Image (cartoon, rainbow, N blue to C red):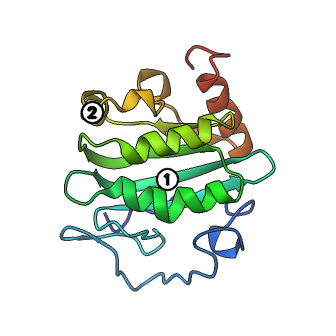
Amino acid sequence: MHQIEPYFRWRDEYIASEDEKSPFFGQQYSESAYSHRLYNFYLHPQWDAFGSTTLYGKILHVDYDEGYTLIELIGEWNDTLHNDIHFLKRNITDHLYDQGIVKFVFFCDNVLNFHATFEDDYYAEWAEEVTGEGGWILLVNTRQHFEEELLTAGLQQYLHFGTAYNGLNWRTAKAQFTFAMLEELVDGRVKHL
């Protein structure tokens, strides 16, 4: 896992550690010192920790004028043992929401598992906040067992995910075009790409 880097081709447009509004402003990175671990596996040092011991992320792009962010995740999303939604919400999305972000896209290509708890308070609060302002929360490229766990926990009432948002090659375009494509899917202007 130490060789999987966060997507870096949008760095000419946005770098979270250089954004004064970002929760990672001023973060320093090493190319050789591995400190983040997922169980017994080290992660590439460019991933950001936000409180979870199993889920890490990277804010790839934020557009404050348009009110959206694109975030890549890696690891295991474990609400059962580690309450990862608490850390994600309180340490990342609340911060961005306070800066005007209401549309959240999470690229889950590297999220291996999802373990739900049947308490949905954080999801409900988050969805209520963003949908009240015309926003939404989208999970892109989730694995089938991840989706099944989301459905079992009833999280489809708060999150967009599923077949229409899977198998998407989001790395081929600029961030703005990637977001525009995803927004059209969420808003139902296109059925499936």
Residue 51 is marked as none
Q: Position of residue 71 (x, y in %)?
A: 54, 53
- Return the residue nearer the eye: 89 or 59: 89
The span from disc 2 to disc 1 (Cα, nearest Å) is 22 Å
Assign a secondary structure to mark 1.
strand
Position of 152 relative to 34 (above/below): above
Left or right of 173? Residue 170 is left
Q: What residue is drawn where x is 34% and y is 75%? A: 36
- Return the residue nearer the eye: 86 or 39: 86
Q: Do the residues labelled 2 and 1 touch (CB within 8 Å)?
A: no
Residue 16 at least partly seen:
yes
Q: Where is residue 35 in the image (x, y as percent from the top left)?
A: 34, 81
Q: What residue is drawn where x is 58% and y is 13%? A: 191
Q: Quadrant of residue 23?
A: bottom right
Question: What number of labels is visible?
Answer: 2
Q: Mark 2 points at which residue?
A: 153
Q: What residue is drawn where x is 27% and y is 51%? A: 79
Residue 109 at least partly seen:
no
Assign a secondary structure to mark 2.
loop
Q: Where is residue 11 in the image (x, y as percent from the top left)?
A: 67, 63
Position of 162 relative to 116 (above/below): above
Q: What residue is drawn where x is 43% and y is 54%? A: 73
Q: Which amino acid does label 2 sit on?
A: Ala
In which quadrant of the rendered image does the N terminus lie? bottom left
- Return the residue nearer the eye: 56 or 29: 56
Q: Which amino acid does label 1 sit on?
A: Glu
Q: Mark 1 points at which residue?
A: 72
In this rendering, the label closer to the viewer, 2 or 1:
2
Category of crowding for the residue at label 1, using alpha-carbon neighbours closer than 10 angstroms: few (below 14), some (14–19), many (at least 20): many
Left or right of 153? Residue 159 is right
Q: In which quarter of the image is residue 193?
A: top right
